[in-house]
């Protein structure tokens, strides 16, 4: 890779990070990083981990392609192969930056783009990209290197398979996005909202009380709920009040609301407060529901007890079908919610709310 290509790629990365920092500073309330955000640079630049990940994956694929071509005895040089991959990495930087700016400045537009009605156009676009990018890469590498087409195709396939294994299975994507299909986390997260999960957090710490967390058992759908009790703690529910280690979680009334789904339901809002001082909103139906009382249980080691914020309409750890959730299935905490609502409550309020 020549110095001009490298300088261009680094300039794109710096421009992307700067644009995301600016977008974060002017973001509407409720669409930026939630408390407590990751410290330092990563906390300021929402897309930085994903940008770094995508760029390294592309450059790794380019290096592997050159190595495979060398093994196939194709006479080529690293710049001839790495150049097209560097250009592709630059395009990814631009695309990810545009997505981040849209999420920050026009969240309603991004939510609408991910609605089920837009599924077919998105699939068509992905199909076009899936065909156009490989063909473009093979053409560019063949044109720059002079290697035979079959050698370039074999090298690209082998390199991309190896990169997919390393960056897909061994090193998970740092950020994963989900579209919410149900009202089990209302009023905090509503139907159609987008959430982003930090997949790297479980590598260095366990979930904290109050965090909205995504879990996924092998072969099952993703499951988003709030962590209420930690391993070894005793937890019970009495008339809707959560009791942890014999101490009820304090809660205060916060008015009323309605869910934002096809059949809006009225909710009585409460602010529930953890012993650590953090707090969050929960919703209950005006009439007492059948699942507001649960006998005390001890959370097993290596598990957490999770509840939905919509307490009368949530399948969670209260039910034997779910029970305490194994830490091994934790995908990571939700650090960002993209919503069209301007009155959406914070995912987790800090101790200053006391």
Image (spheres, grey):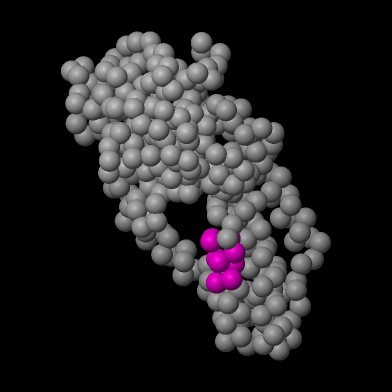
x 67%, y 87%: residue: 72
x 55%, y 72%: residue: 161
Residue 77 lies in what quarter of the image? bottom right
Residue 292, position as x, y percentages in the image: 26, 24
Residue 257 lies in what quarter of the image? top left
The stretch drawn in magenta includes residue 164: yes
In the displayed structure, does residue 117 sit left or right of residue 45? left
User: In the rendered image of this protein, does residue 73 appear above or below residue 13?
Assistant: below
Residue 18, position as x, y percentages in the image: 68, 38
Of residues 149 and 245, which is closer to you in this image?
A: 245
x 66%, y 41%: residue: 17
Q: Is residue 338 visible?
A: no
The stretch drawn in magenta includes residue 86: no
Give the mark count: 0
In the displayed structure, does residue 172 sit left or right of residue 186? right
x 62%, y 53%: residue: 53
Which span is picked out in magenta? 161-169
In the displayed structure, does residue 24 sit left or right of residue 217? right
Residue 39, position as x, y percentages in the image: 66, 32
The quadrant of the rendering that contains the N terminus is: bottom right
Residue 243, position as x, y percentages in the image: 38, 21
Q: Magenta region, mostly helix, strand or loop?
A: helix
User: In the rendered image of this protein, does residue 174 appear above or below residue 24?
Assistant: below
């Amino acid at each position: 890779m020549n110095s001009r290509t490298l300088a261009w790629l680094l300039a794109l990365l710096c421009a992307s990070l700067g644009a995301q920092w600016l977008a974060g500073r002017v973001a509407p309330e409720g669409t930026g990083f939630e408390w407590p955000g990751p410290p330092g640079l990563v906390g300021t630049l929402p897309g930085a981990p994903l940008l770094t990940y995508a760029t390294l994956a592309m450059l790794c694929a380019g290096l592997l392609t050159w190595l495979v071509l060398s093994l196939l005895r194709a006479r080529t040089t690293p710049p001839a192969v790495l150049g097209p991959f560097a250009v592709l990495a630059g395009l990814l930087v631009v695309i990810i930056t545009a997505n981040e700016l849209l999420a920050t400045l026009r969240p309603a537009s991004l939510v609408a783009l991910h609605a089920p009605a837009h599924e077919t156009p998105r699939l068509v676009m992905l199909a076009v990209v899936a065909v156009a990018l490989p063909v473009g890469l093979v053409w560019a590498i063949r044109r720059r290197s002079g290697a035979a087409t079959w050698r370039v195709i074999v090298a690209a396939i082998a390199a991309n398979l190896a990169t997919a294994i390393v960056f897909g299975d061994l090193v998970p994507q740092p950020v994963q996005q989900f579209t919410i299909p149900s009202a089990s986390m209302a009023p905090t997260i509503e139907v159609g909202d987008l959430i982003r999960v930090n997949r790297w957090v479980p590598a260095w710490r366990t979930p904290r009380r109050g965090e909205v967390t995504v879990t996924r058992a092998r072969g099952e759908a993703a499951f988003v709920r709030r962590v209420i009790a930690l391993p070894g703690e005793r937890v019970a529910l009495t008339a809707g009040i959560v009791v942890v280690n014999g101490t009820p979680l304090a809660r205060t009334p916060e008015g009323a609301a309605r869910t934002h789904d096809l059949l809006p339901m009225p909710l009585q809002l409460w602010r529930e407060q953890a012993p650590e001082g953090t707090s969050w909103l929960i919703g209950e139906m005006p009439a007492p529901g059948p699942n507001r009382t649960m006998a005390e249980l001890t959370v097993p080691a290596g598990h957490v007890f999770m509840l939905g914020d919509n307490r009368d309409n949530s399948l969670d750890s209260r039910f034997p079908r779910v029970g305490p959730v194994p830490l091994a299935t934790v995908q990571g905490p939700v650090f960002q919610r993209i919503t069209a609502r301007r009155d959406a409550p914070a995912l987790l309020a800090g101790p200053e709310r006391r």
